Amino acid sequence: MKNTKLVKLLQTFTPAELKKFRDFVNSPYFNKNKNIIKLNNELEKYYPGFDPEELNEEVIYKKVFGAGEYDYFKIKNIISDLYNLGLEFLKQQSNIVTNFSPDYNMLTQLRGRKLMTLHKNFVTQYEKKFKQINIKDGFHLYNEYLLVTERHFSKLLEKPSSIEMIQDEFNRFHDYTLVNLLKFYALMLHIGKENNTSAELKMFDEVFNYIENSYSGSNPIINIYKYIILLTVKRNTKYYYILKEQFIENFDQLTSEEAYYTLMYIFGYCMDRFNINSDRRFIKECYDLFNHSYRKKMVFLGELLYPDFINYVKVFMRFGNKALAGKFIEDYSGLLPADQLDNCINFSNAFVYHCTGQLKEALALISKVNFPLQIMKVQVKIMQIQLNYQLGYFEETREQSEYFRKSLVKEEQISADYKRSILGFLKLIVSLINIKLSTDKKSKEYEINKFKYDMNLNQKNHFGIKFWLEDRFAEIDLK
């Protein structure tokens, strides 16, 4: 039975689902074939591994049908029947999209059978439940719209042409449609920016004009996405502060997915201000956002990605909170992928040591790091060069900078914008060395002016390199 569709399906079941499936198969409403029940009971014994060496069809055949000659088609038929029951079982399971579906189906059945008193009573009960729901996301708005349509039907006999009912129904449909449009726009704009491409944003201009100038609703999910779109398009910091405030205030009304993606959008703007605009204010802004998500235990979605783990450590240390960085490493290192655990811990501790002035310890740790991702390799090389400079190993710094420059020029996995920024950093670090080692006043003055000119011309702050250069320049005796 190796790799049969049935086995592949059963392997996905949790223990709780497997127990529910057993009850499902045993129910005469769904299955009256006792041999299928026997087959399911036997297969349960092999869960969760379903070892193909142990799971032999002939052995299973005897367990189900007893003594007798093995019949290939007979066992295949009930395997197929059990598989189809598995699919039917999946159809019966509620999920986030359809969690109101069973109740909605009951309402439509009551209405179709003209049991309007019962229908009205249940509509009223569900409306009370809906008011108690804290998270009013897109799925909730859709379910709310379905419920309002049923309330509309229940009152048709009382007010056959009530404009208030139609308006209420339209308002619910408006909210459901608007939030989903905004979520799509936000995601498409973000992916387009990340991949330097564009998508066809149908009706975007009309919707953007509406949310910017006309929409004044109170749904927190819609308002959060409204300001995500405004911030993405306008790039105005005032929208960032509004969005940050709404995100934190309404965090408990967001699903885990919405919280994670909203943080992604907001943090993306913060990093643009940090990387491109070299705005030191956003060191604190990044810290506020990550500290909030850490306290709310909303650090990752699904599984912890190791670049995200490192981002948290970097953000906490840039703000100077060594204790929080250490606590984060302690809390989440156990969730890192095993093949990158050592790399992440060594890099994170090297970053902590670097920020706290323990330069030799940092250099020893960073030399052990070898990430597979090219963008992470770049960060390792940058830290090595910075540490060698700060330790006064100027010849090593020159050699590493030149080697890094040559390899970076040929690298195809790093964007042109990142390349320009890092190449500028490598050029400026050599200028710093020249300034420190220069004994001639005119030569030193020339190098200082050259350094200032190149810094102010187009140097960006990817991975904090411009701030590091500014801080090292401020340490130099310019006399």
Image (cartoon, rainbow, N blue to C red):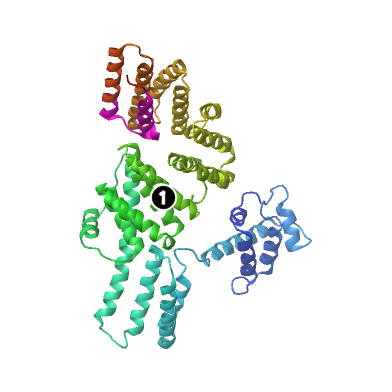
Residue 421: image location, x then y, percent:
34, 29
Q: Residue at x 45, y 70 (%)?
A: 100
SS for dot 1:
helix
**Farthest-out residue, top:** 440
Magenta stretch prevailing secondary structure: helix
Figure quadrant of the C terminus: top left
In this rendering, would 375 be left or right of 34? left
Residue 476 in view (yes/no)? yes
**442 and 290: which is toward the camera:** 442
Residue 365: image location, x then y, percent:
55, 29
Residue 167: image location, x then y, percent:
26, 75
**158 and 134: which is toward the camera:** 134
Q: Is residue 180 magenta?
A: no
Query: Which quadrant holds residue 208?
Result: bottom left
In this rendering, would 31 be left or right of 262? right
- The residue carrying pointer 1 sits among few (fewer than 14), some (14 to 19) or many (20 or more) residues within 10 Å by Cα, namely some
Question: Which span of residues is magenta-colored?
Answer: 454-476
**Farthest-out residue, front:** 479
Residue 286: image location, x then y, percent:
39, 45
Q: Is residue 457 magenta?
A: yes
Residue 200 in view (yes/no)? no
Query: Which quadrant holds residue 79?
Result: bottom right
Q: Residue at x 30, y 20 (%)?
A: 448
**125 and 453: which is toward the camera:** 453
Circle 1 residue: 289
Query: Which quadrant holds residue 84?
Result: bottom right
**260 and 315: which is toward the camera:** 315
Q: Amino acid at mark 1?
A: Leu
Q: Residue at x 57, y 47 (%)?
A: 331
Q: Residue at x 75, y 55 (%)?
A: 59
Q: How many marks?
A: 1
